[in-house]
Structures are given as structure tokens and as C-alpha cells.
Amino acid sequence: MPTLATLAVRLLALALPAAACLAGQTTLTRPDTLREHPSGFSGRIMEVQRRSTVEVLEVRQDWLRVMAPGNRSGWILRQNTDLDAQFPTPGQPPAMHTPPATGHSGLQSRGSPRASNHALIIGGDPGNASAATRLASLMGVPDGNIRYLPGPDMSLEALRRAFVDADARLGDGDRLLIHVTQAAPIDAHPPIARRACPDGIPTTDRQLFSTDELLRHVGTLARRSDKLFLVMDTASPGRSSCPSPHPGGGAHPSLPANVLGLADGGQRITPALLACLEGDAPGLVKAFADGDALQRCVQGAPGTPGPRLRLVGNAALVLVPRALPSPADSQDSAVRLLDILYTQRDQRSVPDIHPQASTDGALRFRASTQAPAYLYALAATPDGIALLHPNRHDSEARLDAGNAVNLTLPALPGGAQRVLFVLTDGPRSMQRAGFIASGESASSGPDPASLYRALEEFLGGDNSPICRLSETRNLGAAQARQCATRVSAKWITPTSGKATR
């Protein structure tokens, strides 16, 4: 009964979970055609649906020979699977010996807009919101995810509705930019003008959107967000001595650890921010610039005039995760980039990983998780970033919920003193990250571009079309985990030892 058999294969393909990726198996991230030989001109055997799990029989450069549902064997394109999200399994040709994927692979650049990024732009004229829109675009916010509240409409009630709407659109783990520009000069509001420097944002209906109320909204949104960035560009003509509202300063409570606030000090800061982030600033900017690096760039060289930028909240967060110009003698080393990755972690959770006693000096750890996750162990060396787990002997990155596992890591490379354990909801592609198998482990190159590429993969997550184009709140639980970009991380300084493998 061929019709029933065909239907059974299709039902089986649809029933398989997207996250299934066991040793010796791989899951299709996009549909593909099973072919007789490793060539696009070869004869077709059958269509294999996305989310189908297949057994890997052979790896040949860009092709995989697999056993597909229905016990049909043939060849599919490697780039249409999640094989490279894990370290190569023992006995198979190491995927990391393959040159990293290039532009022809179909992978989108990390600067591509992602549906889980949002922006709320408040104030200013709609025709003059280009600076804030450019900032949102640099952060990977799609045009459809930008909401505007123009200055002329900036009443107290409209401000409150804008924040409620942002909360309704935000999915769990999304990223949000809130950009605020002054509605009108303070002098245009007689009741407020009598205050030397009002503690809040004057509205068009001559009221005050207080800093305390702003903080409450930010706190609510931060509980849903992976990261939240607040840009207060509210300097008013004629009142340059009045700084912008300063959330988290003075008597105000501090901002959550996943919030970075950038406030002007009497002059507009967005143009200077854009110049720094787009590489047009007169001074050199560190790659992967965090809040502190941006502040130094905006301030300019000592003794030169320039807008004042005040940082509030977590200054170690990265506003735009992209490579920036760097001086040759900068601190943009593997050590710094791993520190940057650590500071971008989801600070609401800490990986449950602990060193274990070892009589032979081996590096042993015990790890567990309450939800399915993927575990990676990284170390910084003078030669780049070393990937210690997965490795040749423990090739499985996936951790099952409730099942504790014992890990034995390769000996720390020369110059490394501590290990960064990174836990992600979805797998990361070691090939796309540029890691090359080397002995028991793998490593990235020492140059800034290679280091950045590795860090970019860990922070960027799955870059497939469904993850870039789907709203997080509309994804099922399994797919949401696959597409999640947030990570948790933990530094551990192990005792010196030599692995027994």
C-alpha cells in the first residue's frame, strides 16, 4: 500500500521534535531532497521534511549520506541540518576540519533583523526620527517591530499606553530598545518651567511623566526581556544645564542587571552614539563595544568638546553586537571577549556545574539542568578560544532535564587559567563559529575577526529563517527554545591537572 506508506513517512517527519539531535543523528533545519549521489544533479529519491531526524552514515564535505524516515538512504546537503551545532562524534570525519561556512551557504549575516528585537521610539517629529531609527536598525530591529510615539502626541496617557503596548508585544527573552526624545522645550510648560530641573519628562498636556513611573515600566519590561536598552536623549534647548532624567541615580532604585541606560548630559547623544557604532567617530572604538567603551568614544579624547554620556544600569552590556574598528594594541583579546560573553548572560539563572574531586589531576565536573539545554566549555588562550566541551570523547552538547552528567575536560591549554561554562537553550554551530578540531578539543583563531565570530555565534543563536522571522510569543515551546538567543554562564577556576583520556 504505497499511499499509506508515504503518508506514514510524512506523519513521522512531522511528529519528530525540532530539538532532537542525538549522537549519530541530525535534524533538518529546512526541507531537502534525498539524492542518489552527493550532487545537486543526481537523481531524486524522496523529499525530506524540515524537523525530520535522520541517521548520519557518512560525511563528505558539503554532503551527508543519511538514513531517512522509511529506511531510505541517500544524500542531503549538510547546510540544511544542525549537524555542525555539535562536536563531531567519534569515528566520523570531524566537521570542524571543513572550512567555515561562507556567504554561499545561505546563512544570513548576524546583522540581519530578527523578529525578537523590538524598539519603542518616543518623542521627536516622525520625519526627524531617523537617528533613533538608524540606532534600532543597527540593533537588528525589523521595521515592523518599531513603534513610534511622536512628540506632538506625547501626552501622559499616550506615554502610558505606549509602555503597555510594548509589554503586550514583547515575548519572553526578547530584546528591547526604548529611545526617548524631549517632547518640547521645558520652557513651553509654564507649571514645569518653575522647577529648576524637573524629575521626569514633560508631556504635551503640561504634565510630568516622572522618572519613578519610567523606572516602574522599565522594570516590568526587563522581567520579560533578555536585554533592555534605554537611551534618554532629552536635552532641551535653553536648558542645557538640566541633565536628562537619570533613572537609577540619586534616590531612585537601581536598574535591573539586564538593563543598560544611556543618558545625555545636556546635549544630544544619539548622533555621537551612531558615529561610534558605525565607525565614523574620530577615535578608535573597541570591537564588541560595551557601555563603557561607548562612553569613552562619545566623550572623545581628553580635553576635546563633546556631548556628555552618562551610563546607568549594567555598563558591561553590548548595545550593538557587531565588529567595530579596533587599535592594533587594544585589549580585544580572547580573555576580553569571554568576559564580554559572560556579562551578556541571563543573570536570572546560574548553570548548575560544580568541580569534582580528582585523584589523578583530571578536570572533572558534574552538570545538570532543569530544562533541556546545550553545554559548552570555553577557555581563553594566547592562540584564541579553546572549545573544551564538546570534545572528541564527550561529543554530546545536549543536557537532558533532570539528568546529571559527569564531564571530563581536556587539560587546560597553555596560558588558560579558568573555564567559562555556557548553557544555551538551543544548539550553537561550531562550524559557523569558526572552530577547527585540534587534538582532543577545538579552537578558534587568535585574530580579532575569528574571536568575534565565535562570540557572535554564542550570542546570536539559531540564524535560520524561522528564528529570524518568527515572533517569539507565537512559537511553540520546542521551537522557542531552539530560537532562543539568551545564555547563562559561569566561570570556574579548576585545579591544575591532566585529563586521563
Image: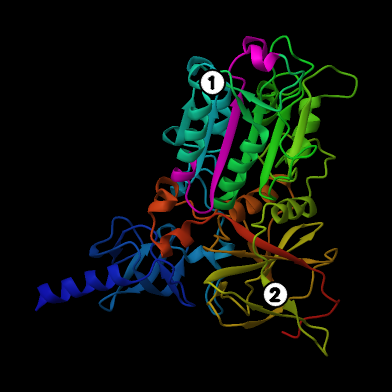
- Identify which residue is drawn at 62% across, 20% down: 182
As helix, strand or loop, the secondary structure at mark 2 comes to strand
Residue 385 sits above or below residue 212 on the image: below
Image quadrant for the C terminus?
bottom right
283 horizontally vs 275: left or right: right
Q: Amino acid at mark 2?
A: Ile
Q: Is residue 62 left or right of residue 459?
A: left
The x and y percentages for residue 96 are: 58, 63
The one of 144 and 378 positioned closer to us in this rendering: 144
**Magenta stretch, residue numbers:** 166-193
Mark 2, other Cα within 10 Å: few <14 / some 14–19 / many ≥20: many
Going from N to C along the chain, the mark reached first, 1 or 2, is 1
Residue of label 2: 353
Q: Residue at x 45, y 59 (%)?
A: 480
User: What percent of the width, then of the height, locates residue 195?
Assistant: 74, 18
Q: What residue sits right under mark 1 in the picture?
A: 130
